[in-house]
Amino acid sequence: MDNLLSLVVFLPLAGAVLLIFVPRGNQSLIKGIALTAALAAFTASLPLYFNFEIANPNMQFIERYQWLPDLGITYSLGIDGISLFLVLLTTFITVPCIYGSFGVIKDKLKGYMFSFLLLETGMLGVFCSLDLFLFYIFWEAMLIPMYFIIGIWGGPRRIYAALKFFIYTMVGSVLMLVAIIYLYLHGMDSAGGGRTFDILLLMENAPHSFPLAAQMYMFAAFALAFAIKVPMFPFHTWLPDAHVEAPTAGSVILAGVLLKMGTYGFIRFCIPFFPAAAKEFVPLISILAVIGIVYGAMVSVIQKDLKKLVAYSSVSHLGFVMLGLFAFNSPGMVGGVLQMINHGLSTGALFFLVGVIYERRHTRMIADFGGLAKIMPMYWTVFMIVTLSSLGLPGLNGFVGEFLILLGAFQSNQVYAIISASGVILAAVYLLWMFRRAMYGKVENPANEKLSDLNLREWLVFIPLVIPIVWIGIYPYPFLVRIGPAVEKVIALLH
Amino acid sequence: MRSALLQIDFHILLPHILLAGSAILVLLIDLLLPASRKSLNQLFAVVFLLITFIVTVFTLWTDPRTSSMLNGDRFSVFFFIIFTTSAVLVIMTADTYLRRNNINLGEFYALIIFAVCGASIMAAAADLISLFLGLEIMSVSLYVLAGFQREKPASNEAAMKYFLIGAFFSGFFLFGTMLLYAATGTTVIYNIIYFANSSNLLFLGGSVLILIAFAFKASLFPFHFWSPDVYDGAPTPISAFMATGAKAAAFAALLRVFFYLYPLMGLSAETALWVVAALTMTIGNVLALAQSNLKRMLAFSSIAHAGYLFVGFLASNEATVQAIMFYLFAYTLMNVGAFTVAYLINVRGEGGYQLSNLAGMGMKNPFLAIVMAVFMFSLAGIPPTAGFFGKFYLFRAALDSGFVYLVIIAVLNSALSVYYYLRVLVIMFMQKETDLPSVKYNLAVSTALILCVIGILNFGVFPGSLMNLLKLAGL
């Protein structure tokens, strides 16, 4: 199929448009359409994996149509080994997000599902765009549904959190827009002029078109937008608010996919467009990543709120991803890309797990629980697998990613690697301590005695999430072999 | 060349004659209509405007002409399209407002059409004298319209303020014209450009005075102070027209006179105007942030938008004219829409423009709330709306001319503006419902709003169609 990527990107949008015509009261039809659209997008995205040419480092499934020829703007999509799994992660994780919201979201269900499907199209568009202008449209447009998801269906401080999320992202994005336009105006100068937003052409020519100073400014403008999204220390303060206030599925998608748009931006745009500047920025970004790893982990240790703990652990985990990407060697960068997927799965699952007890008890304070292992044994099992995956136990996915990242980081700078390794230990501290307090001990709170274990809907959410967690842990080869060539291509640009 | 004055080219005059004729017809028809049927005049006004529109597009667009008094080029036709769009939308939405406030109907529509006539003469002017004629026709109509709610003190105050300050700045324009005549011996714009000489103090003084007059009409810093009060006091549909149609007319005149003249004014002019652009955006946005009244917020935001447009003007390269026209067209759609929703929900009468009164709109009036969301996102410049593409186009032009810092100020401003546009959405969708009554409006209003939304989304996703037209409409 020639338009497979477009189909994947726009199927959710089609579902959203269909939803407009469904009366507000018909909740089961709304749920049906939303779930069908998400499942259809996921099914449509499977051939991307099976038909992917493994050894090919270039863009595949390319589509290209003229959009605004006068301005050099095209509608072009394509994926390589880096974006392939992010696309799959997005289509994959949206399904449990939508399914997991059934029964949880009762108010304004139609608007909720509409926003979610819109969000999915936006995220997929970001990962598939081969045109900078198109990329920017998706990047910004995606803010709108996320803003509503946090602001309408969120917790008590949702309005503050939604605004903060929007403004933070916006400030970064508009500066990136200036850099994008500048890149468009002068990015092809080394090839004798011409103006284009075409990412592939710019990758070839932009590195030679600018003096180092200009590269540094443009790198900084792009990097700021992405660093806010990742979020890197010190731009992370929007994240705990947004995570804590968002509804469960919103937190899942935020941690699972949205944050990855930042790290993806670094490896797709910042490094290939401005390789010389990227090298200059290595110390700064690595140090911020290391601070993020240690700081995020230390703040997680003292959290009393489960959701906040998971949110701060994301700051730490994404610090690892950034450290890996800026190691500029194969293990580090491959590990970084793989860890994006791992973090999406594990942290997504963790947020779902927090959601499960929050729906039952309407509290997320660790101190309110204790002894859940006895009352909810099935819940305990899933929680344990996910926690262990998140702290990087060998045999589960987190280990593979973190090991590769530390290996790569060690090869490029031992000091960063050694300090960051403490993040792994701290992760064990905050996760296991939280696990002990919530799961073991006596059931002291009588409200916890009657808690019901996982129901069918929740099982259907967790089973699909646990499968890849174990799969990547035991047999990461199919992932690494596809990520590898694309990453090698980026590394080649650096030399 | 001078003798061309004697031969009247009716081809060029056609839109202006039709507009003036429509206005007079609407006045006459109003006399014939029984009091209970006055709102039919709305229909007549729209039909006349559409006829003028079609005739103009089929004559002048396909066969552009020029003369030494008025131009019939595509530039003027496209601005005519902007004015007509603004007027048609305003007229379609005004009926509900007029009924609610028990205002006489007929001359209201006639005056709007007169204002359109003045505006299109401004955009078509080839001579400073005819430009002044258009400026006065438009301004006088707007003075009257601003004070249309005679029994309302705020409306009177708005009219008085607008009139006194407007007359004062008309004086600037005339004095500037005189100085330019003294410096170059002509009032024909094209010849002034030809004889321009930046070392001539008369020339510089004259251009600066005229520039100030336009800056006043476009509400650029430091001549913006009138606009929040006037927009606030005037009947809301008129505020919408002033913020879109009249502002577009000011920019049309600015481009006509200064697009070629401004580069000849020297570097110090560029520095000064750079500061004007930066401060216009910043002051508009910062003050809009502080507003708790929706109408005043929109008024201040329209100052900020004038600032963005002025950034595009400063670029003064081949993309400038297209970018400004695109933005003005998009801005017309979103701003008329926003002002319309603002007055529709103001069911409580005076003081009802408080933002807090919007609470719970999302549930009570979902249609209005959703279209308002589109207008707000477009005003904030978030894709996929026409507002985003307009901004992109303006800033691209400015970057192309090397205004990197100015564009950075502009984008930071537009990030700042997101806060107050989103606040409207926060209140509508996320706050507890108050005892908001559901709003009644007629078919014309909802049609106008839907047209605005379709336009905004269409030109946001497929801006190419409009751009291809604009490419033909350069100066």
Image (cartoon, helix red, strand yellow):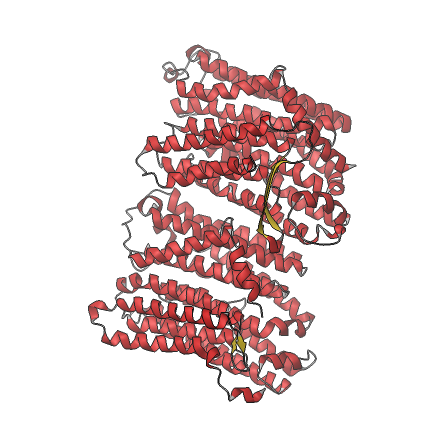
Left or right: B386, with A410 as reference point = left
Q: Position of residue B82 (x, y in %)?
A: 46, 65
Q: Nearer the viewer, residue B290 or A142?
A: A142
Q: Position of residue A258 (x, y in %)?
A: 55, 35
Q: Position of residue B73 (x, y in %)?
A: 53, 73
Residue that appears at 29% across and 72% down: B106
Looking at the rendered structure, the number of numbered marks drawn on it comes to 0
Q: Nearer the viewer, residue A41 or B102?
A: A41
Residue A158 visible in the current orientation? no
Residue that appears at 62% across and 26% down: A339
Q: Which corner quadrant of the image does residue A256 belong to? A: top right
Residue B283 lies, with reference to residue B22, above or below; the image says above
Residue B128 lies, with reference to residue A159, above or below; the image says below
Q: Position of residue B395 (x, y in %)?
A: 60, 57
Which residue occupies the extreme right position in the image? A495
Q: Quadrant of the C terminus of chain A?
A: top right
Q: Which corner quadrant of the image does residue B199 belong to? A: bottom right
Q: Nearer the viewer, residue B97 or B85?
A: B85
Q: Quadrant of the N terminus of chain A?
A: top right
Residue that appears at 50% across and 87% down: B7
Residue A280 visible in the current orientation? yes
Left or right: B470, with A14 as reference point = right
Left or right: A226, with B286 as reference point = right
Left or right: A305, with A400 as reference point = left
